[in-house]
């Protein structure tokens, strides 16, 4: 057990509430009220006089001589006095513990026969033994509830007490907390319904933890009505399985540890861990003296209060109980060792996933620079001139700035100082803002320019759109974004801060954090909200307007406005924002996921614009070049054909054995020329020298464009 002398003496309380939640002050209140109620208890005694009381309750414990049940009775007394002067509470039960439940059943039967009580609250010892006595009491008009230990198959109206399954789970959690190394454990338990349930839940909760029950559970020690005999059985078992064969002892029932035998057992096995299910003064003193590692206790005083309150509602107000189970709180008291193991905190760094961002950034930059170089090199070609190279260059520059925001997105305090990470927070937004404005303004200006020309209401009036007209939207949007960013930078800049995730380790230490960009003064001037809203209103408004412009230009010739591709690019940017932003908000505290999502949003938006704006132009330019090359080859062919024809004519000229074309005699020598139509529609000039026969015919086809 972690009971070395260097262990801390601090005690940590933790409540576990099911139906009714109580503050931590409930424990202190329980003892204060107990002291006040004790005086009343001794004044009124365990019984009571029914002559002057209209309503009488009876607390029926498992046996009377037990502090837990006495405190329950005191809670009932206190609540009864608050309900009215004519309400009283009795305390009736067996003098000794009887696991068969016969003695308790006899007490219930006696109270029913006497007819002096209006309601009972019973801590059930044996469900089978008390089922019929409870039924007889209900038939006699007595309201019956159970507390601490339930009999769900009986006719009781409600159960008031701890959820024993949760009780067992908390005991298991505390054991694993004080000794996380695990090992073999043995349980000291009883056969009562409540203790049985918590024992089963304890075992179930430890199945996935590094703990195993000694001998598979066959070594379990059962309370036999005598604390002395039970501890003797436990000591005998421990002698046969000393540490490290046995690592922990868990006591499921209260008051068993309040003896000299327990102290002797702990002194002889100081390396073991000891957990007990109780929370009295004696148990807390034992914990402070290193005789117990941890305690998990109930609220018996609250059980007494709820018993009286519930019975009063059932008896006097005729109310039905809306919830048949009333849960009460649990209290944990754990001894905190001085030499706690160092906390294992998950910092949730971006880690190697930033390599993906760098790769996507490199791909986008490669395409961006390639398209920029192509635009500059082809700026005088017809396709590029028709698309306005200055706007294409602006798109490339804006895309390069936009995609560069991926670099500061990957900066956290794993690879940089807190100051450097804070600077990256603002740089990221500067790049996103300026890059988005340049890209979006260029697309908007191109579409707006074409719409002004082609949607001119006066079709016969010449419309002139100057560079000044086109540049105004760009300057206006850029200026608005820069003003907002400057105000943000000066008034409430972003800083990189680590925030804790919910949840702690067993010693209430933070186990997970995440880094995020947060306003330097989050509680002043609205934090980041005013600036994000301003940027969103400016940029989103402009993007929506640009989409409207693109829709209006959807049917115009792409040779002049590329309207279809501009509309697709801007719609793509809008979709990325609409889909990605809500998801980004949901995963803002998961840095790796948020980083991947943000990088993909920027990459997809950037590449979507670049590919849609440049690939159709590159394809169109290639087709135009191929058409020009085809025309050039055809022109060269025609020139070559005419050259050959002239050569033939010269061969038939005087001095070369040919006659003049003016010869009228078909049989005479000379150049004879005829014109005819070919099936393909081209004119063909046929020439021959003299009256040569068809074998000597020299034909030159001179193809003319009709």
Image (tube, grey):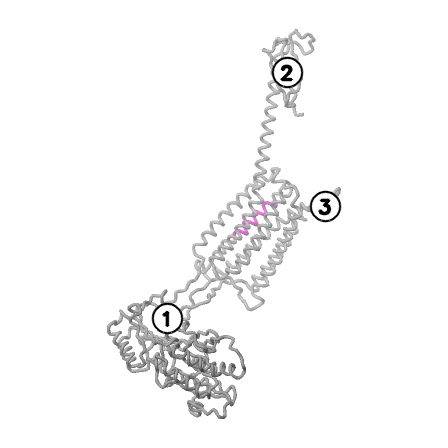
- Name the mark nearer the viewer: 1 or 2: 1
Q: Is residue 383 above or below residue 645?
A: below
* CB under 8 Å between discs 3 and 2: no
Magenta span includes 393 = yes
Count neighbours of disc 1 (C-alpha within 10 A) and say few if under 14, some if 14 to 19, many if 20 or more: some
From which residue to which does the magenta span run?
A: 390-404
Count neighbours of disc 3 (C-alpha within 10 A) and say few if under 14, some if 14 to 19, many if 20 or more: few
Residue assigned mark 1: 200
Residue assigned mark 2: 686
- Secondary structure beneath label 3: loop
Q: CA distance from mark 1 to mark 2?
A: 113 Å
Report x, y in % for residue 445: 64, 48
Label 3 or label 2, whichever comes before in sequence order: 3
Q: Is residue 293 above or below residue 534?
A: below
Which quadrant is home to the N terminus? Answer: bottom left
Q: Residue at x 53, y 52 (%)?
A: 602
Q: CA distance from mark 3 to mark 2?
A: 56 Å
């Amino acid at each position: 057990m972690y009971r070395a002398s260097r262990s801390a003496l601090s005690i940590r309380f933790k409540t576990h509430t099911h139906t009714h939640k109580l503050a931590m002050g409930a424990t202190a209140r329980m003892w204060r009220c107990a002291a006040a109620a004790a005086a009343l208890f001794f004044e009124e005694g365990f019984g009571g006089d029914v002559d002057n009381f209209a309503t009488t309750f009876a607390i029926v414990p498992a046996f009377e001589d037990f502090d837990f049940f006495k405190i329950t009775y005191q809670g009932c007394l206190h609540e009864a006095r608050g309900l009215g002067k004519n309400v009283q509470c009795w305390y009736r039960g067996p003098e000794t513990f009887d696991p068969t439940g016969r003695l308790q059943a006899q007490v219930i039967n006696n109270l029913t026969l006497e007819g002096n009580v209006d309601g009972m609250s019973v801590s059930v010892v044996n469900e089978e033994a008390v089922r019929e006595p409870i039924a007889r009491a209900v038939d006699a008009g007595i309201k019956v509830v159970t507390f601490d230990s339930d009999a769900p198959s009986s006719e009781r109206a409600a159960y008031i007490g701890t959820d024993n399954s949760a009780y067992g789970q908390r005991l298991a959690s505390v054991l694993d907390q004080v000794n996380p190394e695990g090992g073999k454990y043995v349980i000291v338990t009883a056969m009562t319904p409540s203790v049985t349930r918590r024992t089963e839940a304890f075992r179930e909760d430890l199945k996935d933890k590094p703990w195993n029950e000694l001998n598979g559970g066959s070594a379990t020690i059962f309370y036999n009505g005598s604390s002395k005999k039970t501890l003797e059985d436990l000591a005998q078992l421990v002698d046969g399985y000393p540490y490290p064969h046995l690592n922990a002892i868990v006591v499921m029932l209260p008051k068993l540890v309040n003896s000299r035998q327990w102290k002797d057992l702990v002194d002889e096995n100081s390396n073991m861990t000891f957990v007990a299910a109780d929370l009295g003064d004696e148990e807390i003193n034992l914990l402070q003296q290193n005789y117990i590692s941890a305690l998990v206790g109930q609220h018996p005083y609250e059980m007494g209060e709820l018993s009286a309150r519930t019975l009063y509602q059932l008896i006097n107000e005729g109310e039905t109980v809306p919830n048949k189970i009333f849960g009460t709180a649990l209290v944990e008291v754990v001894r905190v060792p001085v030499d706690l193991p160092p906390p294992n905190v998950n910092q949730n760094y971006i880690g190697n996933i930033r390599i993906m961002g760098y790769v996507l950034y490199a791909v986008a930059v490669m395409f961006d620079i390639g398209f920029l170089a192509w635009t500059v090199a082809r700026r005088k070609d017809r396709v590029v001139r028709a698309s306005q190279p200055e706007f294409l260059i602006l798109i490339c520059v804006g895309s390069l700035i936009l995609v560069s925001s991926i670099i500061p997105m990957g900066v956290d305090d794993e690879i940089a100082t807190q100051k450097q990470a804070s600077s990256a927070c603002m740089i990221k937004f500067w790049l996103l803002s300026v890059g988005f404005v340049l890209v979006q303004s260029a697309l908007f200006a191109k579409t707006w320019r074409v719409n002004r020309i082609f949607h001119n209401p006066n079709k016969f009036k010449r419309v002139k759109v100057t560079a000044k007209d086109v540049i105004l939207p760009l300057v206006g949007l850029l200026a608005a974004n820069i003003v907002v960013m400057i105000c943000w930078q000066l008034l409430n800049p972003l800083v990189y801060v680590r925030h804790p995730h919910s949840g702690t380790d067993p010693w209430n230490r933070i186990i997970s954090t995440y880094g995020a960009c947060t306003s330097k003064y989050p509680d002043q001037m609205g934090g980041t909200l005013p600036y994000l809203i301003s940027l969103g209103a400016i940029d989103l408004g402009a993007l929506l307007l640009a989409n409207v412009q693109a829709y209006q230009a959807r049917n115009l010739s792409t040779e002049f406005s590329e309207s279809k591709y501009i509309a697709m690019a801007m719609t793509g940017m809008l979709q990325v924002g609409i889909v990605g932003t809500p998801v980004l908000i949901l995963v803002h505290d998961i840095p790796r996921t948020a980083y991947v999502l943000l990088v993909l949003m920027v990459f997809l938006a950037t590449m979507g614009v670049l590919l849609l704006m440049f690939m159709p132009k590159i394809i169109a330019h290639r087709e135009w070049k191929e058409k020009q090359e085809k025309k050039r080859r055809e022109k060269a062919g025609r020139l070559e054909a005419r050259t050959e024809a002239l050569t033939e004519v010269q061969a038939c000229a005087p001095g070369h054995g040919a006659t003049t074309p003016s010869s009228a005699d078909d049989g005479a020598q000379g150049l004879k020329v005829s014109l005819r139509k070919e099936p393909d529609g081209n004119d063909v000039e046929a020439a021959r020298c003299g009256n040569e026969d068809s074998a000597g015919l020299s034909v030159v086809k001179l193809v003319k464009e009709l």
